[in-house]
Amino acid sequence: GRQAYARVLYASLADDPQKAWAIRECIQFATTLPALKHCSHCSKRHTCRSLSGCLHGGKKRISATAGLEKHLENFAHPQCGSVAKLSRHVANERHHMKQFLRFEHIDTDLWFAQCNPNANVVPLLMSFFAARFTDQRFLIYDEAHKLAGIFDGHQSLLVPADNLQTPPTRSADELLMRKAWKTFYHAATIEARYHPELRTQFMPKRLWQNILEVNEPLDYEIRTGEPTLPPSGLPTSESVSEDVLVITPVKSNEGMKLSESVSPSC
């Protein structure tokens, strides 16, 4: 099935040194499944999307012959569990890149993005961004795997890029848009709800170096030296009575977060 093929393909793009052995074990187990023998003469075997819902002779397939897809859902499976975990990791990394990849406009009318994922996901990103850039040229450079994905407006190409130099000159409109985006990002921030632990959970810190809104300070920060999130002005324990619930800023390992402190009288 196509879903099982996609799982194995994603697992092959992981950085785990044991991925080849895991894929071999999974494929060897797949050859023993009766579903493969059952579909060997089916006219739809090359286009079937789900072996678990396949129909043969008017009888729905039972779960015992559901094919490889059913076993790839089980992370504890002795032969397929490793491929399932690797596939899930690569899929999550691809999702992160789709969210946090930031393009900048170069003066040669090229859109450039640099990333450092934990898996070789650039081949999985090209069709996604090509559909959105349509006829505009772009380049995605994976500095961790030394791979560049190039789209010339018509077709995409993957090339090794051991000595790729970051484009030196940004266009004039790029500098204006970077400033506008940083200003919008800061204006949309709710300071009273600043939660650094939750932020790093959804936006991993290892990706911050290539994310514009967190790796470059705002203009007023450069002038005044103030932090990105200034104190929110919440009441402290000295400014209210002991009979009310106080919300005070508390310093954590990651930065500033909000916590609740209740007086002993409560």
Image (spheres, grey):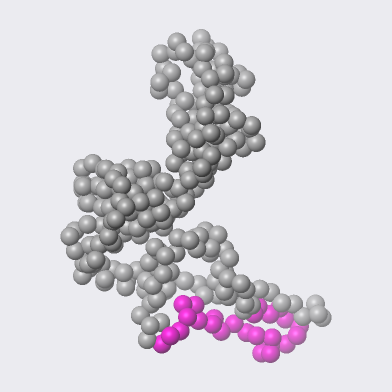
Horizontal and vertical percent for residue 233? Answer: 56, 84
Residue situated furthest left in the rendering? 108
Q: Residue at x 25, y 62 (%)?
A: 167
Q: Residue at x 46, y 30 (%)?
A: 5
- Report the span colored magenta: 224-248
SS majority, magenta: loop
Q: Is residue 130 above or below residue 197?
A: above
Choose between 188 and 97: the one closer to the eye.
97
Horizontal and vertical percent for residue 240? Answer: 69, 87
Choose between 150 and 226: the one closer to the eye.
150
Q: Residue at x 42, y 73 (%)?
A: 186
Quarter residue 68 falls in = top right
Horizontal and vertical percent for residue 22? Answer: 55, 34
Horizontal and vertical percent for residue 127? Answer: 32, 42
The number of discs equals: 0
Which quadrant is the C terminus positioned in?
Answer: bottom right
Specify whether 4 is left or right of 103.
right
